[in-house]
Image (spheres, grey):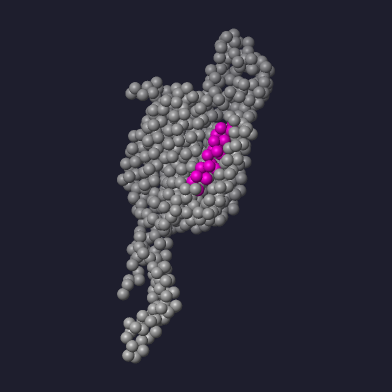
Amino acid sequence: MTDTKPHAEPRQAEADSGLSHRQIMTILYGLMAGMFLAALDQTIVSTAIRTISDDLHGLSQQAWATTAYLITSTIATPLYGKLSDLYGRRPFYLAAITIFVIGSALCTFSTSMYELAGFRALQGLGAGGLMSLAFAIIGDIVAPRERARYQGYFLAVFGTSSVLGPLVGGFFAGQDTIMGIAGWRWVFLVNVPVGAVALIVVAKVLHIPHTRRPHRIDWFGAVTLTLGVVPLLIVAEQGREWGWGSGTALACYLIGGFGVVAWVLVERRMGEDALIPMRLFRDRIFSLASLIGVIFGMAMFGGFMLIPQYFQIVKGSSPTEAGLLMIPVMVGMMGSSIVSGQLTSKTGRYKIFPILGTGIAAIAMGLFALFVDAETSLVTTSLFMVLLGIGLGQCMQTLILVVQNAVPPRDMGVATSAATFFRQMGATAGTAVFLSVLFSNVSGEIAKAFTRDASKPALQAALRDPAVLNDPANAPVIEMARNPNPGGAQGSGVLSDSSFIQQLDPRLAAPFKEGFSEAMQLVFMIAACVMLVAFVLVFFIKEVPLRTMSGLQAKAAAEAEELADADRAAVDATTAVTAATPAAPVGEPAESAAAGGAGTSAEQDARRAAGRRWPRGD
């Protein structure tokens, strides 16, 4: 007789098994190595980009090096999520590290800004998987209730990279040559040994079981998503230079809109095989969390990127010093993330943290808008930064946890990458919009500051000081001080090249610093309002009890249940076949009666049902 339960017991045993804390931490070290690679690169490059563009004679093209990286990393994020759900996490995480390291090595040998942009695009293809897959893997091996505790380690990676990045980037950018190689080229070259270590660690420790399932690859979804997102990212990065209503910008809007509509239609047609299945958006929690992710990313990055500029332009800090001055934000983020993770693990409650986080972040941005100006002390600014970090730290990991807990375990990768993708899109939009607001207001604010300060004794004394008048660096500003012009080129030049401010006499530099800080206040107020929108929306998220099984355990349990159902159906079908077979008359062989009964409709239906439901094995 055929065994009717060939798979259920092994599957159930797998479902009941879990990884120990030591095994989880071993895998976590590998993931942190990969994430550190991408996070460190972002902070190093942002510190050294001006030196790089000067050396490659491409100051006007430097934005493309950032845009190329942003485009490919954003597009690659959902692709990594979907493919890793189909084929497993390990090969794609290793591929992401490898691509990133190769791209970094090629960046080292760039001879023009266009070459650098191309190689940065290759880097971005790898970076798109380093972040999203790390969170998906944690979702696989750790139960949601315990997950927040472990995800706090990832913020430690970001905090460390935010401190080390400006230091390392500033050091490399400040060296003419190191071992016969231009100093700035080590900004990229340093990724090679770091990436090699990460590759070895991940290859050694990252072993996660995976069951492949039948599928189609959504090529058309990938193409239409690229068609929709790339023009929108380009116009977000370049729109300030082109003009938001220019012909080029309008073409990007039209192409991007067409691509997004085409992508939705393709995804609906692809069904379960879609890059991001449309059924996920029918889940209110997933849809609302994705929307909050966009808004949160917009407010967070749109306001967050102004703080280092404030330190450099208003306070005269170097890029390295500005990076170090960001430590209070990171301390607040790491502390609040760890505490909220521990409380989530103990209580199983999580909704309160994004409510508190968005509220506190909105308050902190409001404080920046109301009280931070050119004369604000570093202590006051640091306190506001700690408060901002406390707010952000309670949201960043919790919003991903909400998405992961809302979807079936088999969608862990695509859901996590979708959450990351939407946050990146929000961050890009926020950065573009807020920089546009800042750029359009800073010239007028600087002119107002000159008009306001014109009668002050300090500025009048500077305009009569022979030392100031004879210094060539002060000449353009002296003319502006005597004839303030709201549309003055010197005011609009602050964002394109602010280095001249530090060369000015402090009395002449004061209106520039006042004007920038006042323009920044408007941006922070807008960011606070955007964050308040996220604060309101969080109240509408339904708090679903956190699962107590990891993604792997939940998938194994679901598979065991499906096979058990199939086994029961097979047994029922066999019983139906036996019941439908007529008893053999006296004197007639049993084989003849059974053969005659085999053609009955009931028996055939039962056998077909059994054939459909019987599991064939993995």
| Apparent side of residue 16 relative to residue 538 in the rendered image (left or right) | left
Does residue 531 appear left or right of residue 24 in this picture? right
Up the image or down, 495 lies above or below 301; here it is above
In terms of depth relative to the viewer, which is nearer, 564 or 198?
Answer: 564
Q: Residue at x 56, y 39 (%)?
A: 232
Quadrant the N terminus occupies: bottom left
Residue 145: % across, % down: 45, 54
User: Taking 569 as reference, is 291 above or below it?
Assistant: above
Taking the spot 63% from the left edge, 13% from the top edge, the residue there is 463
Residue 568 appears anywhere in the view: no
Q: Quadrant of residue 109?
A: top left
Q: Is residue 482 above or below residue 317?
A: above
> On the rendered structure, is 9 left or right of 259?
left
Whether residue 96 appears in this view of the structure is yes
Residue 95, given in percent of the width and then of the height, sits at 38, 43
Q: Residue at x 38, y 65 (%)?
A: 615
In the image, 139 versus 333, the foreground residue is 139
Q: Residue 592, located in which quarter of the rendered image?
A: bottom left
The percent coordinates of residue 451 (x first, y second) are: 68, 21
Looking at the rendering, the stretch of residues picked out in magenta corresponds to: 221-240
Residue 324 part of the magenta segment: no
Q: Compared with residue 484, is residue 214 higher up or lower down, i.e. above or below? A: below
Q: Quadrant of the C terminus?
A: bottom left
- In the image, residue 198 lies at what x, y percent? 35, 40
- Helix, strand or loop: magenta stretch: helix
Residue 238 colored in magenta in the image:
yes
Judging depth in this view, the residue of 128 and 539 nearest the camera is: 128
Would residue 589 appear left or right of 341 to someone viewing this image? left
> How many numbered marks are there?
0
Residue furthest out toward the bottom:
586
Residue at 33% x, 37% y is 196
